[in-house]
Image (cartoon, rainbow, N blue to C red):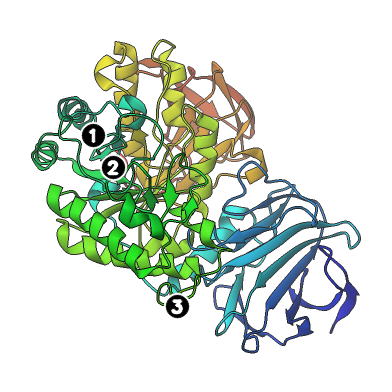
Amino acid sequence: MTTSAVTTAERPPAATTPLLDDVTLAVLADGRPVRPHVRRRSDGVLALSVTAPPGAALEIRLAVPLRDAVGYWHPTCGWTRTLPPDWSAPMTTSLVRGAPAGCLYACDGATLLAFAAQDPVTPARLVHGVSEAGKRFVVHLELTAPTGPYTLFLAPRAPSPATALRRLRDRLTATAAQPPLGLPPAGRGPAYSTWYALGQDVTADAVAHEARLAARLGCQLLILDDGWQRGGRSRGYAWAGDWRTDTEKFPDLAAHVAEVRGLGMAYIAWVAPLLAGPDSPLWRDLAPLAPLPSPTAPGAHVLDPRDPRVRAHVVATCARLVGDHQLDGLKLDFLDDAMVYADDARDEGRGDGRDDVSAAMDLLLGEIRDALTPLCRATPLIELRQPYLGHGMAAYGNLLRATDCPADAVANRVRTVDAGLLRSGGAVHSDMLMWDPDHTPQAALRQLLAVLHATPQLSCRLGELPQLHYKALKFWLAQWARLRPLLVEGEVEPGRPDELYPLVRAAKAESEAVVVHAERTVPLDLAGRRRVDIVNATAAEALVLDLADGGPYDARCTAYDVTGETAGEYGLDLVGGGPVKLPVPPSGLLSLRVRSGTYVGGAEGYEPL
Protein backbone atom coordinates (compact mmCIF):
# COMPACT_ATOMS: atom_id res chain seq x y z
CA MET A 1 0.00 0.00 0.00
CA THR A 2 1.29 3.46 -0.84
CA THR A 3 0.49 6.74 0.83
CA SER A 4 0.07 10.09 -0.87
CA ALA A 5 3.17 11.61 -2.39
CA VAL A 6 4.81 14.30 -0.31
CA THR A 7 7.54 16.82 -0.94
CA THR A 8 10.16 16.99 1.79
CA ALA A 9 13.58 18.57 2.19
CA GLU A 10 12.89 20.61 -0.97
CA ARG A 11 13.02 17.43 -3.06
CA PRO A 12 10.54 16.39 -5.77
CA PRO A 13 7.60 14.41 -4.41
CA ALA A 14 7.77 10.64 -4.21
CA ALA A 15 5.21 8.05 -3.17
CA THR A 16 5.97 6.35 0.14
CA THR A 17 5.18 2.90 1.53
CA PRO A 18 4.86 1.75 5.16
CA LEU A 19 8.07 0.28 6.53
CA LEU A 20 8.24 -0.12 10.32
CA ASP A 21 5.99 1.23 13.07
CA ASP A 22 4.96 4.67 11.69
CA VAL A 23 8.03 5.00 9.45
CA THR A 24 7.42 5.26 5.70
CA LEU A 25 9.90 4.72 2.90
CA ALA A 26 10.67 5.86 -0.63
CA VAL A 27 13.67 4.62 -2.62
CA LEU A 28 14.80 6.33 -5.82
CA ALA A 29 17.58 5.67 -8.33
CA ASP A 30 18.21 8.66 -10.58
CA GLY A 31 14.77 9.86 -9.50
CA ARG A 32 12.94 6.64 -10.42
CA PRO A 33 11.33 4.33 -7.83
CA VAL A 34 13.31 1.23 -6.88
CA ARG A 35 11.93 -1.78 -5.04
CA PRO A 36 13.97 -2.58 -1.91
CA HIS A 37 14.40 -5.94 -0.21
CA VAL A 38 13.14 -5.86 3.39
CA ARG A 39 13.75 -8.53 6.00
CA ARG A 40 13.03 -8.55 9.73
CA ARG A 41 15.76 -10.14 11.82
CA SER A 42 15.14 -12.37 14.84
CA ASP A 43 16.14 -9.49 17.14
CA GLY A 44 13.40 -7.29 15.65
CA VAL A 45 15.81 -5.15 13.64
CA LEU A 46 14.70 -4.52 10.08
CA ALA A 47 17.26 -4.95 7.28
CA LEU A 48 16.52 -2.79 4.22
CA SER A 49 18.72 -3.59 1.19
CA VAL A 50 18.70 -1.61 -2.05
CA THR A 51 20.58 -2.21 -5.28
CA ALA A 52 20.67 0.67 -7.74
CA PRO A 53 21.35 0.24 -11.46
CA PRO A 54 25.06 0.66 -12.33
CA GLY A 55 26.11 4.28 -12.22
CA ALA A 56 22.80 5.50 -10.80
CA ALA A 57 22.51 7.88 -7.87
CA LEU A 58 20.62 6.35 -4.96
CA GLU A 59 18.28 8.15 -2.57
CA ILE A 60 16.61 6.55 0.46
CA ARG A 61 13.87 8.62 2.09
CA LEU A 62 12.58 7.86 5.56
CA ALA A 63 9.70 9.79 7.12
CA VAL A 64 7.78 9.54 10.38
CA PRO A 65 4.93 11.62 11.87
CA LEU A 66 6.14 14.24 14.33
CA ARG A 67 3.98 13.01 17.23
CA ASP A 68 5.75 14.51 20.29
CA ALA A 69 9.31 14.34 18.94
CA VAL A 70 11.74 16.54 20.84
CA GLY A 71 15.21 15.57 19.61
CA TYR A 72 17.32 13.92 16.94
CA TRP A 73 20.71 12.34 17.66
CA HIS A 74 23.44 11.35 15.22
CA PRO A 75 27.16 10.61 15.80
CA THR A 76 28.34 14.13 14.97
CA CYS A 77 25.37 16.12 16.26
CA GLY A 78 27.50 18.11 18.70
CA TRP A 79 25.24 20.58 20.49
CA THR A 80 22.57 20.50 17.76
CA ARG A 81 20.41 17.68 19.07
CA THR A 82 16.93 19.14 18.90
CA LEU A 83 14.77 19.32 15.74
CA PRO A 84 16.22 21.20 12.75
CA PRO A 85 14.13 22.13 9.71
CA ASP A 86 14.61 19.87 6.73
CA TRP A 87 16.07 22.74 4.69
CA SER A 88 19.03 23.14 7.03
CA ALA A 89 22.53 22.31 5.83
CA PRO A 90 23.14 18.69 4.81
CA MET A 91 26.03 16.68 6.17
CA THR A 92 28.34 14.16 4.55
CA THR A 93 29.58 11.08 6.37
CA SER A 94 32.59 8.94 5.54
CA LEU A 95 34.89 6.49 7.29
CA VAL A 96 36.68 9.37 9.04
CA ARG A 97 33.67 11.64 9.58
CA GLY A 98 30.78 10.38 11.66
CA ALA A 99 28.55 7.59 10.40
CA PRO A 100 25.24 7.31 8.49
CA ALA A 101 23.06 6.74 11.54
CA GLY A 102 20.44 8.63 13.51
CA CYS A 103 17.75 8.42 16.18
CA LEU A 104 14.58 10.48 16.60
CA TYR A 105 12.96 10.33 20.04
CA ALA A 106 9.93 11.65 21.88
CA CYS A 107 9.38 13.63 25.08
CA ASP A 108 9.18 10.45 27.18
CA GLY A 109 12.49 9.27 25.70
CA ALA A 110 10.97 6.55 23.51
CA THR A 111 12.31 6.32 19.98
CA LEU A 112 10.31 7.13 16.86
CA LEU A 113 13.01 6.29 14.31
CA ALA A 114 16.44 4.68 14.69
CA PHE A 115 18.60 3.62 11.75
CA ALA A 116 22.21 2.90 10.79
CA ALA A 117 23.81 2.00 7.46
CA GLN A 118 25.84 -1.18 7.36
CA ASP A 119 28.43 0.38 5.03
CA PRO A 120 30.57 2.93 6.93
CA VAL A 121 32.97 3.66 4.06
CA THR A 122 30.88 4.83 1.12
CA PRO A 123 30.35 8.59 1.52
CA ALA A 124 26.72 9.42 2.23
CA ARG A 125 25.00 12.80 2.07
CA LEU A 126 22.26 13.15 4.64
CA VAL A 127 19.49 15.69 4.94
CA HIS A 128 17.29 15.46 8.01
CA GLY A 129 14.75 17.58 9.81
CA VAL A 130 11.14 18.67 10.17
CA SER A 131 9.14 18.92 6.98
CA GLU A 132 7.07 22.05 7.43
CA ALA A 133 4.64 21.04 4.69
CA GLY A 134 4.31 17.38 5.59
CA LYS A 135 4.34 17.70 9.38
CA ARG A 136 6.82 14.86 9.48
CA PHE A 137 10.43 14.28 10.38
CA VAL A 138 12.37 13.17 7.33
CA VAL A 139 15.77 11.66 6.61
CA HIS A 140 17.14 11.66 3.07
CA LEU A 141 20.24 9.53 2.53
CA GLU A 142 21.91 10.10 -0.83
CA LEU A 143 24.75 8.17 -2.47
CA THR A 144 26.51 8.77 -5.75
CA ALA A 145 26.62 5.59 -7.82
CA PRO A 146 27.04 3.00 -5.03
CA THR A 147 28.42 -0.37 -6.05
CA GLY A 148 26.50 -3.42 -4.91
CA PRO A 149 23.60 -3.53 -2.46
CA TYR A 150 23.32 -0.85 0.23
CA THR A 151 21.81 -1.92 3.54
CA LEU A 152 20.12 0.10 6.26
CA PHE A 153 19.23 -1.38 9.65
CA LEU A 154 16.21 0.05 11.46
CA ALA A 155 15.42 -0.68 15.09
CA PRO A 156 11.79 -0.98 16.22
CA ARG A 157 10.47 1.46 18.78
CA ALA A 158 12.40 1.27 22.04
CA PRO A 159 12.04 2.91 25.45
CA SER A 160 15.21 4.97 24.95
CA PRO A 161 17.76 5.95 22.29
CA ALA A 162 20.41 3.90 24.11
CA THR A 163 18.28 0.76 23.85
CA ALA A 164 17.57 1.23 20.14
CA LEU A 165 21.16 2.09 19.32
CA ARG A 166 22.44 -0.97 21.21
CA ARG A 167 20.32 -3.13 18.93
CA LEU A 168 21.74 -1.41 15.88
CA ARG A 169 25.27 -1.61 17.29
CA ASP A 170 24.94 -5.35 17.80
CA ARG A 171 23.73 -5.79 14.23
CA LEU A 172 26.53 -3.61 12.83
CA THR A 173 29.14 -5.55 14.79
CA ALA A 174 27.76 -8.89 13.65
CA THR A 175 27.82 -7.87 9.98
CA ALA A 176 31.05 -5.85 9.93
CA ALA A 177 33.50 -6.57 7.12
CA GLN A 178 36.30 -6.87 9.68
CA PRO A 179 36.22 -7.72 13.41
CA PRO A 180 36.97 -4.99 15.97
CA LEU A 181 40.60 -4.51 16.91
CA GLY A 182 41.24 -6.29 20.20
CA LEU A 183 41.76 -4.28 23.36
CA PRO A 184 44.81 -5.06 25.52
CA PRO A 185 44.45 -4.64 29.31
CA ALA A 186 46.39 -1.35 29.22
CA GLY A 187 43.57 0.19 27.17
CA ARG A 188 40.99 -0.66 29.81
CA GLY A 189 42.59 1.16 32.72
CA PRO A 190 43.11 4.88 33.38
CA ALA A 191 45.62 6.66 31.17
CA TYR A 192 47.96 9.59 31.71
CA SER A 193 48.42 12.09 28.86
CA THR A 194 51.10 14.76 28.77
CA TRP A 195 49.15 17.29 26.70
CA TYR A 196 47.28 19.54 29.16
CA ALA A 197 49.80 18.86 31.94
CA LEU A 198 53.03 19.64 30.10
CA GLY A 199 52.05 20.93 26.69
CA GLN A 200 55.03 20.91 24.35
CA ASP A 201 57.42 21.27 27.30
CA VAL A 202 57.95 17.52 27.49
CA THR A 203 61.29 15.96 28.40
CA ALA A 204 62.30 12.43 29.31
CA ASP A 205 62.78 13.39 32.97
CA ALA A 206 59.52 15.34 33.29
CA VAL A 207 57.44 12.62 31.64
CA ALA A 208 59.06 9.84 33.68
CA HIS A 209 58.35 11.80 36.88
CA GLU A 210 54.65 12.12 36.05
CA ALA A 211 54.54 8.48 34.93
CA ARG A 212 55.78 7.28 38.32
CA LEU A 213 53.05 9.24 40.09
CA ALA A 214 50.40 8.12 37.60
CA ALA A 215 51.36 4.46 38.03
CA ARG A 216 50.82 4.78 41.80
CA LEU A 217 47.29 5.96 41.08
CA GLY A 218 46.59 2.93 38.91
CA CYS A 219 47.19 4.41 35.45
CA GLN A 220 48.10 1.72 32.93
CA LEU A 221 48.93 3.79 29.87
CA LEU A 222 51.20 6.77 29.16
CA ILE A 223 50.35 8.92 26.14
CA LEU A 224 53.20 11.17 24.98
CA ASP A 225 51.56 14.01 23.12
CA ASP A 226 52.83 16.84 20.90
CA GLY A 227 56.30 18.17 21.67
CA TRP A 228 58.47 15.06 21.50
CA GLN A 229 59.28 15.60 17.82
CA ARG A 230 61.63 17.99 16.06
CA GLY A 231 59.86 21.30 15.56
CA GLY A 232 57.45 20.71 18.41
CA ARG A 233 58.40 23.79 20.42
CA SER A 234 55.76 26.24 19.24
CA ARG A 235 52.14 26.04 18.21
CA GLY A 236 51.40 25.52 14.55
CA TYR A 237 52.30 22.60 12.32
CA ALA A 238 54.54 24.00 9.59
CA TRP A 239 57.29 21.63 10.80
CA ALA A 240 55.23 18.45 10.29
CA GLY A 241 56.39 15.71 7.98
CA ASP A 242 59.50 13.84 9.08
CA TRP A 243 58.49 12.84 12.65
CA ARG A 244 61.96 12.56 14.13
CA THR A 245 62.71 12.81 17.85
CA ASP A 246 63.87 16.05 19.44
CA THR A 247 67.04 14.59 20.97
CA GLU A 248 67.52 17.54 23.33
CA LYS A 249 64.25 16.58 25.03
CA PHE A 250 64.60 12.82 24.59
CA PRO A 251 68.25 11.80 24.11
CA ASP A 252 67.20 8.14 23.95
CA LEU A 253 63.46 7.80 23.48
CA ALA A 254 63.58 4.00 23.39
CA ALA A 255 65.37 3.88 26.78
CA HIS A 256 62.83 6.35 28.19
CA VAL A 257 59.96 4.19 26.93
CA ALA A 258 61.55 1.14 28.55
CA GLU A 259 61.81 3.04 31.86
CA VAL A 260 58.11 3.89 31.85
CA ARG A 261 57.20 0.37 30.82
CA GLY A 262 59.11 -0.83 33.86
CA LEU A 263 56.47 0.93 35.96
CA GLY A 264 53.83 -1.39 34.53
CA MET A 265 52.49 1.12 32.00
CA ALA A 266 52.10 0.78 28.25
CA TYR A 267 53.41 3.69 26.15
CA ILE A 268 52.08 5.31 22.97
CA ALA A 269 53.07 8.54 21.20
CA TRP A 270 51.11 11.18 19.32
CA VAL A 271 51.50 11.58 15.57
CA ALA A 272 49.57 13.38 12.84
CA PRO A 273 50.80 11.35 9.87
CA LEU A 274 48.77 13.12 7.17
CA LEU A 275 50.24 16.55 7.95
CA ALA A 276 53.19 18.08 6.10
CA GLY A 277 54.52 21.63 6.32
CA PRO A 278 56.98 23.88 4.49
CA ASP A 279 59.44 23.82 7.42
CA SER A 280 59.81 20.05 7.29
CA PRO A 281 63.09 18.63 5.95
CA LEU A 282 60.93 16.43 3.73
CA TRP A 283 58.82 19.24 2.30
CA ARG A 284 60.46 19.17 -1.13
CA ASP A 285 59.39 15.54 -1.53
CA LEU A 286 56.05 15.82 0.22
CA ALA A 287 54.77 19.10 -1.25
CA PRO A 288 53.51 17.57 -4.51
CA LEU A 289 51.59 15.01 -2.45
CA ALA A 290 49.93 17.62 -0.21
CA PRO A 291 48.38 20.28 -2.47
CA LEU A 292 45.65 21.44 -0.07
CA PRO A 293 46.10 23.22 3.29
CA SER A 294 44.78 21.71 6.49
CA PRO A 295 41.45 23.15 7.67
CA THR A 296 42.36 22.55 11.33
CA ALA A 297 46.19 22.48 11.69
CA PRO A 298 47.64 25.96 11.07
CA GLY A 299 50.69 26.03 8.81
CA ALA A 300 50.32 22.48 7.53
CA HIS A 301 49.09 20.87 4.35
CA VAL A 302 47.31 17.53 4.12
CA LEU A 303 48.83 14.54 2.36
CA ASP A 304 46.37 13.08 -0.13
CA PRO A 305 45.68 9.48 0.98
CA ARG A 306 44.44 8.54 -2.48
CA ASP A 307 48.04 8.55 -3.67
CA PRO A 308 49.85 5.25 -3.02
CA ARG A 309 53.09 7.16 -2.37
CA VAL A 310 51.34 8.92 0.50
CA ARG A 311 50.10 5.67 1.97
CA ALA A 312 53.57 4.14 1.72
CA HIS A 313 55.10 7.17 3.47
CA VAL A 314 52.50 7.19 6.27
CA VAL A 315 52.73 3.46 6.94
CA ALA A 316 56.53 3.55 6.96
CA THR A 317 56.52 6.53 9.33
CA CYS A 318 54.15 4.86 11.79
CA ALA A 319 56.04 1.56 11.68
CA ARG A 320 59.39 3.31 12.19
CA LEU A 321 58.13 5.19 15.26
CA VAL A 322 56.79 2.05 16.91
CA GLY A 323 59.69 -0.18 15.91
CA ASP A 324 62.56 2.21 16.69
CA HIS A 325 61.21 3.26 20.09
CA GLN A 326 59.44 0.03 21.12
CA LEU A 327 56.10 1.78 21.51
CA ASP A 328 52.86 -0.06 22.24
CA GLY A 329 50.97 1.91 19.60
CA LEU A 330 50.16 5.42 18.42
CA LYS A 331 47.74 8.27 18.95
CA LEU A 332 46.59 9.12 15.40
CA ASP A 333 45.47 12.72 15.08
CA PHE A 334 43.94 14.89 12.33
CA LEU A 335 42.75 11.91 10.26
CA ASP A 336 39.55 13.76 9.39
CA ASP A 337 41.61 16.37 7.55
CA ALA A 338 41.77 13.88 4.68
CA MET A 339 38.25 14.94 3.76
CA VAL A 340 39.59 18.18 2.24
CA TYR A 341 40.01 15.98 -0.84
CA ALA A 342 36.42 14.73 -0.84
CA ASP A 343 35.44 17.12 -3.65
CA ASP A 344 38.86 17.29 -5.28
CA ALA A 345 39.13 15.77 -8.76
CA ARG A 346 42.16 13.52 -9.17
CA ASP A 347 44.77 14.77 -11.60
CA GLU A 348 45.24 12.46 -14.54
CA GLY A 349 47.89 9.83 -13.90
CA ARG A 350 47.98 10.25 -10.11
CA GLY A 351 47.52 7.23 -7.89
CA ASP A 352 45.95 3.84 -8.37
CA GLY A 353 42.37 4.71 -9.17
CA ARG A 354 41.13 5.04 -5.59
CA ASP A 355 39.37 8.31 -6.24
CA ASP A 356 37.25 8.04 -3.10
CA VAL A 357 39.03 9.51 -0.07
CA SER A 358 37.03 7.38 2.35
CA ALA A 359 38.02 4.16 0.56
CA ALA A 360 41.64 5.31 0.48
CA MET A 361 41.56 5.92 4.25
CA ASP A 362 40.04 2.47 4.73
CA LEU A 363 43.00 0.98 2.90
CA LEU A 364 45.55 3.18 4.69
CA LEU A 365 44.29 2.44 8.19
CA GLY A 366 44.29 -1.28 7.51
CA GLU A 367 47.89 -1.04 6.34
CA ILE A 368 48.89 0.89 9.47
CA ARG A 369 47.24 -1.68 11.73
CA ASP A 370 48.86 -4.58 9.90
CA ALA A 371 52.28 -2.90 9.99
CA LEU A 372 52.13 -2.18 13.73
CA THR A 373 50.76 -5.54 14.86
CA PRO A 374 54.01 -7.55 14.59
CA LEU A 375 55.99 -4.71 16.16
CA CYS A 376 53.99 -4.54 19.42
CA ARG A 377 54.07 -6.84 22.44
CA ALA A 378 50.31 -7.24 22.22
CA THR A 379 47.54 -5.90 20.01
CA PRO A 380 48.63 -2.32 19.20
CA LEU A 381 46.95 0.47 21.13
CA ILE A 382 45.65 2.96 18.57
CA GLU A 383 43.85 6.10 19.72
CA LEU A 384 41.24 7.69 17.49
CA ARG A 385 39.04 10.67 18.33
CA GLN A 386 35.77 12.22 17.34
CA PRO A 387 34.59 12.74 14.66
CA TYR A 388 36.27 9.59 13.30
CA LEU A 389 34.77 7.10 15.74
CA GLY A 390 32.16 5.55 13.45
CA HIS A 391 31.55 1.82 13.52
CA GLY A 392 33.83 1.33 10.53
CA MET A 393 36.82 2.50 12.58
CA ALA A 394 36.46 -0.32 15.11
CA ALA A 395 38.80 -2.47 13.02
CA TYR A 396 41.54 0.18 13.11
CA GLY A 397 41.50 1.70 16.60
CA ASN A 398 40.67 0.66 20.14
CA LEU A 399 41.01 3.86 22.21
CA LEU A 400 38.04 6.01 21.22
CA ARG A 401 38.58 9.49 22.64
CA ALA A 402 36.22 12.40 23.02
CA THR A 403 37.42 15.38 21.05
CA ASP A 404 39.25 18.17 22.88
CA CYS A 405 37.22 19.96 25.57
CA PRO A 406 39.73 21.20 28.19
CA ALA A 407 38.16 21.60 31.65
CA ASP A 408 34.64 21.29 30.17
CA ALA A 409 33.04 18.56 32.23
CA VAL A 410 29.68 18.85 30.47
CA ALA A 411 31.20 18.48 27.01
CA ASN A 412 33.33 15.55 28.17
CA ARG A 413 30.27 13.81 29.61
CA VAL A 414 28.17 14.37 26.49
CA ARG A 415 30.89 13.42 24.03
CA THR A 416 31.88 10.23 25.81
CA VAL A 417 28.25 9.10 26.10
CA ASP A 418 27.74 9.90 22.41
CA ALA A 419 30.85 7.91 21.49
CA GLY A 420 29.61 4.89 23.41
CA LEU A 421 26.11 4.70 21.92
CA LEU A 422 27.27 2.99 18.71
CA ARG A 423 30.65 1.68 19.91
CA SER A 424 31.44 -1.59 18.16
CA GLY A 425 34.67 -2.36 20.00
CA GLY A 426 37.50 -0.85 21.99
CA ALA A 427 37.11 1.50 24.96
CA VAL A 428 35.68 5.01 25.02
CA HIS A 429 38.24 7.37 26.56
CA SER A 430 37.55 10.79 27.97
CA ASP A 431 39.30 13.86 26.74
CA MET A 432 42.23 14.56 29.00
CA LEU A 433 41.15 15.75 32.45
CA MET A 434 42.44 19.08 33.68
CA TRP A 435 41.19 21.58 36.26
CA ASP A 436 42.07 24.67 38.27
CA PRO A 437 44.51 23.50 40.97
CA ASP A 438 43.76 26.60 43.04
CA HIS A 439 40.06 25.83 43.36
CA THR A 440 38.25 23.29 45.54
CA PRO A 441 38.70 19.53 45.27
CA GLN A 442 34.94 19.26 44.76
CA ALA A 443 35.18 21.33 41.59
CA ALA A 444 38.31 19.52 40.45
CA LEU A 445 36.86 16.04 40.81
CA ARG A 446 33.70 16.89 38.93
CA GLN A 447 35.91 16.58 35.85
CA LEU A 448 36.41 12.90 36.67
CA LEU A 449 32.84 12.29 37.87
CA ALA A 450 31.62 13.56 34.50
CA VAL A 451 33.24 10.59 32.74
CA LEU A 452 32.81 7.72 35.20
CA HIS A 453 31.01 5.86 32.38
CA ALA A 454 34.19 6.03 30.24
CA THR A 455 37.91 5.39 30.68
CA PRO A 456 39.54 8.51 32.15
CA GLN A 457 42.67 10.14 30.81
CA LEU A 458 44.43 12.33 33.38
CA SER A 459 46.46 15.33 32.30
CA CYS A 460 47.49 17.38 35.31
CA ARG A 461 50.85 17.78 37.03
CA LEU A 462 50.31 15.16 39.67
CA GLY A 463 53.34 16.16 41.73
CA GLU A 464 51.99 19.71 42.07
CA LEU A 465 48.43 18.86 43.08
CA PRO A 466 47.23 20.17 46.44
CA GLN A 467 47.05 17.39 49.02
CA LEU A 468 43.25 17.33 49.08
CA HIS A 469 43.08 17.17 45.28
CA TYR A 470 45.43 14.20 45.26
CA LYS A 471 43.51 12.45 48.03
CA ALA A 472 40.21 13.00 46.23
CA LEU A 473 41.66 11.80 42.93
CA LYS A 474 42.99 8.63 44.55
CA PHE A 475 39.63 7.91 46.17
CA TRP A 476 37.60 8.44 43.03
CA LEU A 477 39.92 6.46 40.78
CA ALA A 478 39.43 3.57 43.19
CA GLN A 479 35.65 4.02 42.94
CA TRP A 480 35.90 4.14 39.15
CA ALA A 481 37.67 0.78 39.21
CA ARG A 482 35.00 -0.64 41.53
CA LEU A 483 32.08 0.66 39.48
CA ARG A 484 33.66 -0.20 36.14
CA PRO A 485 31.76 -3.52 35.71
CA LEU A 486 28.55 -1.47 35.64
CA LEU A 487 29.24 1.99 34.24
CA VAL A 488 31.91 1.08 31.68
CA GLU A 489 31.32 -2.55 30.77
CA GLY A 490 27.58 -2.70 31.39
CA GLU A 491 24.58 -1.39 29.47
CA VAL A 492 24.51 2.29 30.32
CA GLU A 493 21.23 4.20 30.22
CA PRO A 494 21.99 7.94 29.96
CA GLY A 495 18.52 9.28 29.08
CA ARG A 496 17.58 11.85 26.44
CA PRO A 497 20.42 13.29 24.35
CA ASP A 498 18.89 16.78 24.23
CA GLU A 499 18.94 16.91 28.04
CA LEU A 500 22.73 16.26 27.93
CA TYR A 501 22.48 13.09 30.02
CA PRO A 502 21.83 14.50 33.53
CA LEU A 503 21.42 11.01 35.07
CA VAL A 504 23.71 8.24 33.88
CA ARG A 505 22.79 4.87 35.30
CA ALA A 506 23.53 1.20 34.82
CA ALA A 507 22.09 -1.87 36.58
CA LYS A 508 23.08 -5.51 36.62
CA ALA A 509 21.42 -8.21 38.70
CA GLU A 510 21.48 -6.93 42.31
CA SER A 511 23.69 -3.88 41.72
CA GLU A 512 23.03 -0.42 40.35
CA ALA A 513 25.10 2.73 39.88
CA VAL A 514 23.71 6.20 39.22
CA VAL A 515 25.75 9.32 38.51
CA VAL A 516 23.74 12.49 39.15
CA HIS A 517 24.99 15.46 37.11
CA ALA A 518 22.08 17.86 37.70
CA GLU A 519 20.01 18.81 40.71
CA ARG A 520 16.97 16.70 39.99
CA THR A 521 15.02 13.88 41.60
CA VAL A 522 16.57 10.44 41.14
CA PRO A 523 14.01 7.66 40.44
CA LEU A 524 15.06 4.54 42.30
CA ASP A 525 13.60 1.06 42.54
CA LEU A 526 15.21 -1.15 45.20
CA ALA A 527 13.36 -4.32 44.20
CA GLY A 528 15.96 -6.98 43.49
CA ARG A 529 18.82 -4.75 44.59
CA ARG A 530 21.45 -5.51 47.19
CA ARG A 531 23.66 -2.49 46.58
CA VAL A 532 23.13 0.90 44.96
CA ASP A 533 25.87 3.51 44.54
CA ILE A 534 24.75 7.07 43.81
CA VAL A 535 27.35 9.67 42.85
CA ASN A 536 26.55 13.30 43.61
CA ALA A 537 28.37 15.05 40.74
CA THR A 538 26.63 18.33 41.58
CA ALA A 539 27.40 21.19 43.96
CA ALA A 540 24.33 20.40 46.07
CA GLU A 541 24.60 19.14 49.65
CA ALA A 542 21.86 16.51 49.30
CA LEU A 543 20.14 14.17 46.84
CA VAL A 544 16.42 13.56 46.48
CA LEU A 545 15.53 9.93 45.74
CA ASP A 546 12.07 9.05 44.44
CA LEU A 547 11.52 5.49 45.65
CA ALA A 548 9.21 3.16 43.80
CA ASP A 549 6.47 1.44 45.76
CA GLY A 550 7.63 -1.79 47.35
CA GLY A 551 9.49 -3.04 50.32
CA PRO A 552 9.68 -2.66 53.13
CA TYR A 553 13.44 -2.23 52.76
CA ASP A 554 16.00 -1.72 55.47
CA ALA A 555 19.00 0.02 53.90
CA ARG A 556 22.33 0.87 55.44
CA CYS A 557 23.42 4.20 53.99
CA THR A 558 26.96 5.54 54.03
CA ALA A 559 27.82 8.95 52.62
CA TYR A 560 31.39 9.85 51.66
CA ASP A 561 32.84 13.24 50.88
CA VAL A 562 35.00 13.99 47.85
CA THR A 563 38.15 12.65 49.53
CA GLY A 564 36.54 9.40 50.71
CA GLU A 565 36.05 10.43 54.32
CA THR A 566 32.82 9.15 55.86
CA ALA A 567 30.33 12.02 56.04
CA GLY A 568 27.44 10.07 57.53
CA GLU A 569 26.35 6.54 58.25
CA TYR A 570 22.85 5.57 59.22
CA GLY A 571 20.05 3.08 58.80
CA LEU A 572 17.05 3.91 56.67
CA ASP A 573 13.68 2.21 56.92
CA LEU A 574 11.95 2.48 53.58
CA VAL A 575 8.28 1.64 53.56
CA GLY A 576 6.26 2.35 50.45
CA GLY A 577 7.28 4.87 47.81
CA GLY A 578 7.85 8.58 47.54
CA PRO A 579 10.67 11.12 47.76
CA VAL A 580 13.43 10.88 50.33
CA LYS A 581 16.05 13.61 50.78
CA LEU A 582 19.45 12.35 51.92
CA PRO A 583 22.53 14.41 52.78
CA VAL A 584 25.40 13.71 50.36
CA PRO A 585 28.39 16.07 50.10
CA PRO A 586 29.12 17.72 46.74
CA SER A 587 31.22 15.43 44.54
CA GLY A 588 30.51 12.75 47.11
CA LEU A 589 29.12 9.24 47.14
CA LEU A 590 26.07 7.63 48.71
CA SER A 591 26.32 3.86 49.06
CA LEU A 592 23.14 1.94 49.95
CA ARG A 593 23.31 -1.65 51.11
CA VAL A 594 19.85 -3.13 51.21
CA ARG A 595 19.72 -5.45 54.22
CA SER A 596 16.18 -6.73 53.87
CA GLY A 597 13.56 -6.94 51.20
CA THR A 598 13.78 -8.95 48.01
CA TYR A 599 17.21 -9.30 46.49
CA VAL A 600 19.25 -12.04 44.88
CA GLY A 601 22.78 -13.37 45.07
CA GLY A 602 26.00 -11.60 45.90
CA ALA A 603 27.38 -8.35 44.53
CA GLU A 604 29.12 -9.66 41.42
CA GLY A 605 32.16 -7.62 40.47
CA TYR A 606 31.98 -5.45 43.56
CA GLU A 607 34.17 -5.09 46.60
CA PRO A 608 33.44 -3.16 49.80
CA LEU A 609 34.77 0.38 50.00
Which numbered disc, 3 or 2, marks the residue that appears first in the sequence? Answer: 2
Query: Mark 3 or 1, which is nearer the eye?
Result: 3
* Label 1 Cα crowd, 10 Å radius (few <14 / some 14-19 / many 20+): some
Q: Nearer the viewer, residue 171 or 211?
A: 211
Disc on the earlier residue, 2 or 1 = 2
Which residue has dot 1 on it? 218
Q: CA distance from mark 3 to mark 2?
A: 42 Å
Q: Secondary structure at mark 1?
A: loop
Residue 505, relative to residue 69: is it above or below? above
Q: Amino acid at mark 2?
A: Gly
Q: Position of residue 72 (x, y in %)?
A: 69, 52
Badge 1 amino acid? Gly
Residue 475 visible somewhere in the drawing: no
Q: Which residue is mark 2?
A: 189
Q: Earlier in the sequence, mark 3 or mark 1?
A: 1
Residue at 23%, 64% (x, y): give it.
Answer: 371
Give the distance between the C-alpha atoms of the residues marked 3 and 1, in whole angstroms: 48 Å
Q: Which mark is residue 353?
A: 3
551 left or right of 278? Answer: right
Q: Are marks 2 and 1 in contact (CB under 8 Å)?
A: yes
